[in-house]
């Protein structure tokens, strides 16, 4: 090889070895969210958080909404995404199917670490309690939803109303669909998260029953994400409430979100038992 060719080859080698880490460092991480709301609404709610975490890591983070709950569970379970925001029941199913993942933080809403859902009906309905749902038409959201299926279905069974005692039950895909269907009179009652009930209450809904306290939604990471990044993400989430724009970012995700607090696998053991019981009845 001629001297000039050697020099050119050396320059190419130097360029590629120095530029590749820079390119790799700028590849975006994926923050995956389960489809509990319309996709546009989820993007609006979680993009401010993604931007905040991007600054923390010095790496872009993009929001991806799962096609359905199973898709979301499999995406983080098989490490196809880097960070995931999960409902409590899907998280317990993830544990059963894929094992433990690094935990980052969980929601604290109105200074409470627990999530609540409600079973609703129309204001003019004569239904006052769960036992009166026998022979009625009932609307669930997604099959994998904590508050629009798993826990409410457990409550119905505990009240002596297994789904076989209903005249009809259907899965409508989302909390909003349930609220709208009950308002329209298509169903006698349905199950939604409290946040959605509050949104629709003034339109003519009321509560029949409130779910027991359940550990709230949480953030987890892929098993392949470097430990240093996991620690930075966890610290950034736990200190979010104290950041200058922290309240704005939190209220975008949930209007009543007061903090992100430490999450532990043991917090979800009781719910895991409920999920197993409901699963055995299907």
Image: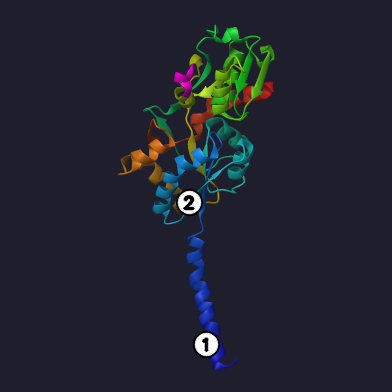
Magenta stretch prevailing secondary structure: helix
Which residue bears the numbered disc 2? Answer: 61
In the rendered structure, find residue 7 and report the number of the disc placed on it: 1
Left or right of 105 on screen, residue 88: right
Q: CA distance from mark 1 to mark 2?
A: 39 Å
Q: Position of residue 40 (x, y in %)?
A: 52, 40
Q: 59 or 100: which is nearer to us?
A: 59
Q: Residue at x 48, y 33 (%)?
A: 217
Left or right of residue 185, residue 196 in this image: left
Q: Mark 1 vs mark 2: which is more N-terminal?
A: 1
Image quarter of the C terminus: top right
User: In the image, residue 202 lies at what x, y percent?
Assistant: 44, 19
Residue drawn at 46 percent across, 26 percent down: 195
Q: Is residue 232 visible?
A: no
- In the image, which is nearer the foreground, mark 1 or mark 2? 2
Residue 187 percent coordinates (x, y): 61, 17
Q: Tell me if residue 219 comes above or below residue 195 in the rendering.
A: below
Helix, strand or loop for disc 1:
helix
Look at the image and say whether residue 130 sits in the magenta stretch. Answer: no
Neighbourhood count class around disc 2 (C-alpha, 10 Å): few under 14, some 14–19, many 20 upward: many
Q: Which residues are magenta?
A: 200-204
- Picture residue at 62% right of the left edge, 37% below the top: 68
Quadrant for the N terminus in the image: bottom right
Callout 1: few (<14), some (14-19), or many (20+) C-alpha neighbours within 10 Å? Answer: few
């Amino acid at each position: 090889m001629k001297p000039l060719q050697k020099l050119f080859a050396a320059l190419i080698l130097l360029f590629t070895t120095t530029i590749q880490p820079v390119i790799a460092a700028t590849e975006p991480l994926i923050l995956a969210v389960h489809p509990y709301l319309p996709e546009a609404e989820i993007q609006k709610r979680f993009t401010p958080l993604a931007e905040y975490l991007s600054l923390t890591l010095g790496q872009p983070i993009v929001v991806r909404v799962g096609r359905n709950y199973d898709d979301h569970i499999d995406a983080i379970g098989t490490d196809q995404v880097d960070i995931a925001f999960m409902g409590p029941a899907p998280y317990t199913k993830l544990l059963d199917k894929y094992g433990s993942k690094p935990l980052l933080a969980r929601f604290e809403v109105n200074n409470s670490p627990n999530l609540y859902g409600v079973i609703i009906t129309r204001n003019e309905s004569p239904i006052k309690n769960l036992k009166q749902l026998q022979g009625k038409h009932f609307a669930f959201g997604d099959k994998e939803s904590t508050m629009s299926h798993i826990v409410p279905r457990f409550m119905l069974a505990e009240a002596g109303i297994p789904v076989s005692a209903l005249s009809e039950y259907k899965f409508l895909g989302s909390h909003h669909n349930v609220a709208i269907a009950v308002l329209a009179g298509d169903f006698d009652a349905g199950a939604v998260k409290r946040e959605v009930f509050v949104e629709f209450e003034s339109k003519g809904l009321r509560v029949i029953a409130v779910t027991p306290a359940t550990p709230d939604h949480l953030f987890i990471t892929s098993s392949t994400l470097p430990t240093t990044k996991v620690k930075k993400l966890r610290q950034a989430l736990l200190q979010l409430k104290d950041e200058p724009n922290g309240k704005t970012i939190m209220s975008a995700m949930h209007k009543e979100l007061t903090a992100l607090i430490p999450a532990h696998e043991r917090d979800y053991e009781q719910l895991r038992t409920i999920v197993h019981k409901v699963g055995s009845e299907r």
